Amino acid sequence: MSAPMIVFDRVSKNYGDLAVLRDINLTVAAGEVISLIGPSGSGKSTLLRCVNHLERIERGSITVDGELIGYRRNGNHAYELPEKLIARQRARIGMVFQSFNLFGHMTALENVIEAPVHVLGIPRREAENLGAELLVRVGLADKLKSYPRMLSGGQQQRVAIARALAMKPKVILFDEPTSALDPELVGEVLDVMRSLAADGMTMMVVTHEMSFAREVCHRIAFMESGRIVECSTPTEVLDNPAFERTRTFLSKVQ
């Protein structure tokens, strides 16, 4: 396996008195695709959002490509980074949400190039060329000038993926990227994700698409009550789960 890309070291997070993440230890290798599965409220999306510091952790640490995320250390103490530095870290951690979050007044191409131009400072012509290439890559060569309202949900989500790729991220986080789509549109988004996995993109995916998890992911982590109950190959987790709780969950979703 390749060198570590994402490392969770004893990560814990609370909402008031509620512990939503409990002592999470997980290493994701460069080029690895790992899916997070489990019941609603188990902490999957929260764990994902901690990677780019959209959620603050109470204890532990998260590093991406060797860089501590959201904090700097001074001896035994950790201090939160200024928002400007956090934004710089986030720029290299792509994220694709359930909802597409596209700017309605911008075309597909304009949505893709907005951050490269204004965050990375890429010249507009160069960004437009990159954006066009990425929209071709996600199968939207004929939609560059289309506005979100003119696109299907699957097409909008593929624009969102192209937008994430435009920042040249080290990793991409997918938070149930197909859950808001009509069933017939799910496949076109999963096909793009399969292509990214084949190209060696490091990916963490919260999903209920078990066929995708089995086919594409290197490992599957089953979460329950803020803990990773088990994490192994798709064959081990889906066909021979070690824990009864995992078996009960899978019996309802497979």
Image: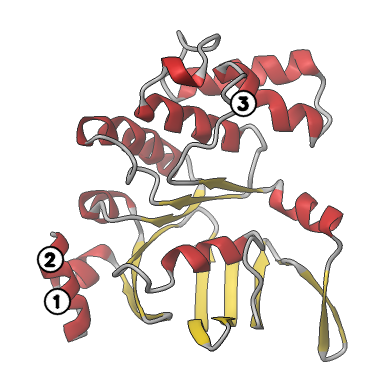
Q: Position of residue 93 (x, y in %)?
A: 63, 51
Disc 3 is placed on an element classified as helix
The answer to which of 85 and 136 lies nearer the viewer is: 85
Q: Label 2, label 1: how many angstroms apart (C-alpha)?
A: 7 Å
Kind of residue indicated by mark 2? Lys
The colour scheme applied to this rendered structure is secondary structure
Query: Which numbered disc covers residue 97?
Result: none
Q: Position of residue 108 (x, y in %)?
A: 55, 19
Residue where numbered disc 3 is placed = 112
Q: Are the residues at dot 2 and dot 1 in contact (C-beta closer than 8 Å)?
A: yes
Say which residue appears at 64% left-offset and 59% top-offset.
52
Q: Is residue 81 visible?
A: yes
Kind of residue indicated by mark 3? Val
Q: Are the residues at dot 1 and dot 3 in contact (C-beta closer than 8 Å)?
A: no
Residue where numbered disc 1 is placed = 248
Residue where numbered disc 2 is placed = 252
Instruction: Identify the image quadrant of the C terminus.
Output: bottom left
Q: Label 1, label 3: how many angstroms apart (C-alpha)?
A: 41 Å
- Report the label total: 3
